[in-house]
Image: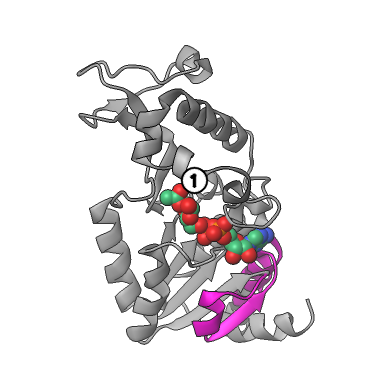
């Protein structure tokens, strides 16, 4: 890891016992679990599939079966994935800090599987479903998972859809409000595996910076977040985050 080792030790010093930490994660944190990101050139979902067709309310209206089958494929893929050392290191960092809020743009459940509690999901969850019209929650049966088209809502009969945020839709307001308030008041904003291109999650590191926080970015590629970060930890989260958690532990042991 070379010069990154030194930067990790520098970053670890900001994770004091009483520091208020907010961590924002994106698809990159799950990449090493085999879950594809969205914008990576070869493997990214939006490099291989049309977001307009698959992740907009208009796309769902035009061809609900196509959207359903695509989300069932993703559900299967994510359901078979296991948390990686990056997810586990974030759960450990949370245990080492008094105030640690994990905010994710991911629709998988790998943070929870790794032991993180109270994760704020800004873009919903692949495991939740609701009626497209009346928003009533829907519990999927095994048959519905294998079906070619979405089931009907038990209450109003309209189509059931994945409870994820599509392009052009609003995020869950309470989650955004909680994340923004925490970002504004935090001491450390740890950003992991996001391209920082999707609003409003992309604003959280800026809000934190304006509030006086130290911004630390973990990513194998430089991008808009690394350019505003105080410390850029260049590398994969599955390697950098365990090293960061270890450095925090070692600093605590010295005290
Ligand atoms: P992107 O695909 O835009 O970005 C993934 C980021 O992860 C890139 O910056 C990669 O360099 C980085 N990355 C790749 N491998 C990594 C690794 N092993 N460790 C750490 N980082 C790695 O994904 P997001 O930023 O999450 O929204 O995208 C934001 C939103 O756009 C998603 O939540 C999704 C998408 O459209 C919705 O579906 C609403």
Residue 17, how many percent across, how many down? 46, 77
Outermost residue toward the front in this view: 62
Q: Is residue 219 above or below residue 133?
A: below
Residue at coordinates 30% horizontally, 68% vertically from top-left? 180
Residue 57, how many percent across, how many down? 34, 39
Residue 252: in magenta span: no
Task: Please tell me in which quarter of the rendered image ligand 1 is found.
Answer: bottom right
Q: Main secondary structure of the magenta part?
A: helix
Residue at coordinates 48% horizontally, 80% vertically from top-left? 215
Residue 232: in magenta span: yes
Residue 230, how many percent across, how many down? 52, 86
| Label 1 CB sits under 8 Å from any ligand 1 atom | yes
Residue 106, how many percent across, how many down? 48, 50
Task: Report whether residue 98 is seen.
Answer: no
Which quadrant of the figure has residue 247?
bottom right
In the foreground, 228 or 113: 228
Task: Report whether residue 154 is seen.
Answer: yes
Residue at coordinates 49% horizontally, 20% vertically from top-left? 145
Q: Secondary structure at mark 1?
A: helix
Q: Which residues are magenta?
A: 221-248
Which quadrant of the figure has residue 177?
bottom left
**Horizontally, is 25 left or right of 201 in the view?**
right
């Amino acid at each position: 890891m070379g010069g990154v080792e030194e930067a990790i030790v520098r970053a670890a010093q900001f994770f004091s016992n009483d520091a208020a930490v907010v961590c924002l994660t994106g698809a990159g944190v799950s990449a090493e679990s085999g879950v594809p990101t969205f914008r990576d050139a070869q493997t990214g979902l939006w490099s291989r599939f049309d977001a307009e067709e698959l992740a907009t309310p208009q796309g769902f209206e035009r061809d609900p079966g196509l959207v359903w089958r695509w989300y069932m494929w993703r559900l299967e893929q994510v359901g078979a994935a296991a948390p990686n050392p990056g997810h586990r290191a974030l759960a450990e960092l949370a245990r080492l800090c008094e105030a640690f809020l994990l905010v994710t743009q991911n629709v998988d459940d790998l943070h929870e599987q790794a032991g993180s509690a109270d994760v704020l999901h800004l873009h919903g969850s692949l495991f939740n479903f609701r009626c497209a019209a009346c928003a009533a929650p829907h519990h999927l049966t095994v048959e519905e998972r294998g079906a070619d088209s979405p089931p009907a809502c038990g209450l109003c009969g309209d189509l059931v859809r994945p409870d994820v945020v599509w392009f052009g839709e609003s995020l869950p307001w309470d989650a955004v409000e909680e994340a923004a308030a925490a970002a504004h008041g935090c001491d450390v904003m740890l950003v992991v595996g996001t391209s920082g291109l999707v609003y409003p999650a992309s604003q959280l590191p800026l809000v934190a910076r304006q509030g006086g926080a130290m911004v630390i970015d973990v990513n194998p590629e430089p991008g808009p977040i690394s350019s505003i970060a105080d410390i850029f930890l260049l590398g994969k989260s599955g390697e950098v985050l365990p090293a960061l958690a270890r450095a925090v532990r070692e600093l605590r042991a010295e005290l």
